[in-house]
Amino acid sequence: MDVVLWDYWRSSASYRVRIALNLAGIAYRTVPVDLLAGEQGSAAHSVRNPQGFVPVLDIGGLRLTQSLAIIEYLNETQGLGLLPGDAATRALVRQISYVIAMDTHPICNPSVVEQVIALVVQAEPVRTDWMRHFILRGLRACEALLPETDGYFSIGAHPSLADICIAPQLYNAGRWLVPFDDIPKPTRIGAACAAHPAFSAAIPEAVKD
């Protein structure tokens, strides 16, 4: 089965899908979409995704967009166990995931930040302050929501959807020099993710070329 992922090496959403594909043990072919060069706005990519975003996954002739939808599809078809069996814990995992994927990542998307920068006279420190503020706000919310656990990951010994969302956000936090002092739970999870081969194989530097 030819599996194709249109992505950008530093895209958090693409990063999440790469982790899920690695967890599933699915070999895939990457087609880079250079966001800095504006390739996401091309006519060809608009056919793949009318929003002009990455990632786009073509798997078995099925073309999917939106990272969480892709990950849930892989979870359901590959039995990854990314969502717990009981409804309450499943809701908690989704809460934490949505804090990152729906409330933090979108307002730190380069296209959003560039629009903000276009409205101000001086790009810096506005860009950096914006990114640090919203990334830290999201990670602090995760800190409050994450349960105390003896496991390495968000809800135990096995990665969940929450971990797939947290790991790329921590990568971005590092890029923008966000202080980790008051987010020990996400920091602990980040260390566990970094030691997992499915996560380490998905980091931007591992796929850049």
Image (tube, grey):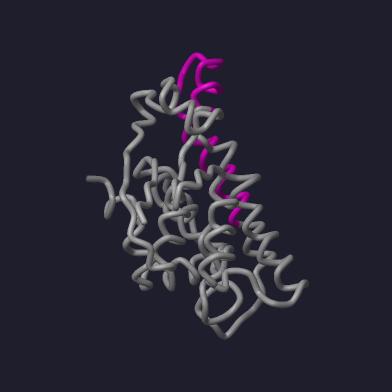
Could you tell me what secondary structure mostly forms the magenta stretch? helix
Farthest-out residue, bottom? 150
- Location of the N terminus by quadrant is bottom left
Quadrant of res 148: bottom right
For image coordinates 47% across by 60% down, the residue present is: 167
> Above or below — where is 156 with respect to 114?
below
For image coordinates 52% across by 61% down, the residue present is: 74
Left or right: residue 159 versus residue 26 is right
Left or right: residue 168 versus residue 162 is left
The verdict on residue 136 being magenta is: yes
Foreground of the two, 200 or 184: 200
Q: Can you give x and y, in whole percent of width and height, for residue 89 in the image?
A: 72, 73
Quadrant of res 22: bottom left
- Location of the C terminus by quadrant is top left
For image coordinates 33% across by 60% down, the residue present is: 27
- Count of residue discs: 0
Farthest-out residue, left? 209
Q: Can you give x and y, in whole percent of width and height, for residue 42 in the image?
A: 41, 21
> Above or below — where is 32 with respect to 158?
above
The verdict on residue 28 being magenta is: no
Point out the stretch of residues depicted in magenta. 112-139
Farthest-out residue, right? 88
> Above or below — where is 103 with respect to 21?
above
Foreground of the two, 96 or 31: 31
> Above or below — where is 3 with respect to 146?
above
Q: Can you give x and y, in whole percent of width and height, for residue 50 in the image?
A: 55, 28
For image coordinates 54% across by 42% down, the residue present is: 65
Q: Can you give x and y, in whole percent of width and height, for residue 91 in the image?
A: 74, 65
